[in-house]
Amino acid sequence: MLRALGHRNYRLFFSGQSVSLVGTWMTRIATSWLVYRLTDSALLLGVVGFAGQIPSFLLAPFAGVLVDRWNRHRLLVATQVLSLLQSLALALLALGGRINIHHVIWLSVFQGLINAFDMPARQAFVVEMVERREDLPNAIALNSSMVNASRLLGPSIGGVVIAAVGEGWCFMIDAVSYVAVIASLWAMRVTPRESKGARGGNVLGQLREGFTYAARFAPIRKVLMLLGLVSLVGMPYTVLMPVFAEEILRGGPNTLGLLMAASGVGALAGAMFLAARRSVLGLGKYIPLMAAAFGAGLVAFSFSRALWLSLLLMVVTGLGFMVQMAASNTLLQTIVDEDKRGRVMSFYTMAFMGTAPFGSLLAGAAAERIGAPHTLLIGGLGCVVGAVWFALSLPALRRDVRPIYARIGILPEVAAGIHTTSELGVPPET
């Protein structure tokens, strides 16, 4: 389950990120609570979510081209330093009592600009930290475990800190936590990767090449389409959590922390499930299955008025979204050509983070008009419909990835059974 930690660079990265991400999740919950405390507006919660995520939609494809050209290690150091400065600015404004909604919006835009480069670089850099390709799925699953363990701890700690001393100290703790990941990146010994033509040509030409590659290959295209749909209609549930915590469940920042932590419990369970898997084979079926579970969890959550039931349903939603997202990531990283990895992972970022701002804005506006529960109900149903559409495509997608699995040596793993897939005349599971 911990095979990827045998690689020194990945072990350093994992250690530093484990500290930093706790601070990141503290900032997320503190930002949401601060906005709702300052404005009492679900719409402005959506606006802040939009501001923080729209740069990924606009810039991620171009960032992907540059990630394929630039030194990913140095790029990640730069993004972490800039993120530290962003959190420090939030902390100083909040602790000084001068922060207002305009500060939050513009600093969210700044963090979004950083993330547009950070996310595709981070996803693509995993391959450079893990020398053995067979350990790549484990590294991606451990990444997800790390994110979601911090998603469990961060909101819980953040809720307590907010209730005790206010949002500003959450931002300050986050700023300090970036030191850990910056130190871990500097401690790495990274061999410069060999670039296959990524530095040649113009940015627009390489962007077009990457888009054509992703759009014409059905497995990549459909994985990204489902992820984009789920992020658009389902992921904005996080934006509405302060509304549910205060108005529906009659709680405060501690209730918000519990809801987000419960989602983190489910997500961590999903990540550990993926980390325990030894092969990418059979992973494809979990993409629609877990997208449907995520949507169904949101539908049920929209009807809940009891805290214990809401927490249980948050576990289900966290599990569903985590497994769908990480399984999609693993499949893309497995089948993509190395010289287009940065661009394809930027499309992944665009589908995951780039559609979310529109969803956040729409969810905030809809919640103002029809209420947060009805907004969540509609989003959950949309996720279920998308999952059914993808499930109907699975047989064709398995046929498409079969030559790639054979080329990179994954298919022989099924030869330990009674027959190989070629003897049976059926495609392998994706």
Image (cartoon, grey):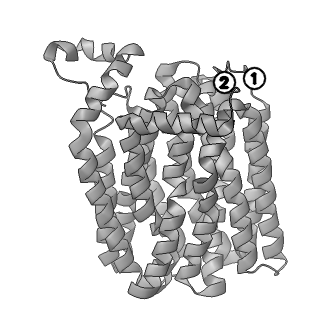
Residue 57 relative to residue 91: left or right: left
Q: Tag 1's secondary structure?
A: loop
Tell me the quadrant of the picture where the N terminus can be found.
Answer: top left
Tell me the quadrant of the picture where the C terminus can be found.
Answer: top left
The one nearer the camera, 375 or 320, is 375
Residue 23 relative to residue 210: left or right: right
Does the image show residue 206? Answer: yes
Numbered mark located on residue 245 in the image? none
Name the residue at 22% across, 34% down: 395
Q: The residue under label 2 is which amino acid type?
A: Arg
**Discs 2/1, front:** 1
Name the residue at 77% across, 60% down: 86
Mark 2 or 1, nearer chain start: 2
Numbered mark located on residue 189 in the image? 1
Where is residue 124? Give x, y as percent. 59, 34
Residue under label 2, please give it.
8
Where is residue 263? Give x, y as percent. 44, 60
Name the residue at 78% across, 30% down: 187
Does the image show residue 327? Answer: no
Residue 426 relative to residue 267: left or right: left
The answer to whether residue 17 is above or below residue 266 is above
Name the residue at 63% across, 32% down: 125
Badge 2: few (under 14), some or many (20 or more) residues near its Cα, within 10 Å? some
Where is residue 188? Give x, y as percent. 74, 28
Q: The residue under label 1 is which amino acid type?
A: Arg
Where is residue 152? Give x, y as percent. 52, 57
Is there CB contact under 8 Å for labels 2 and 1? yes
Residue 312 relative to residue 235: left or right: left
Q: CA distance from mark 2 to mark 1?
A: 9 Å
Quadrant of the rendered image containing residue 375:
bottom left
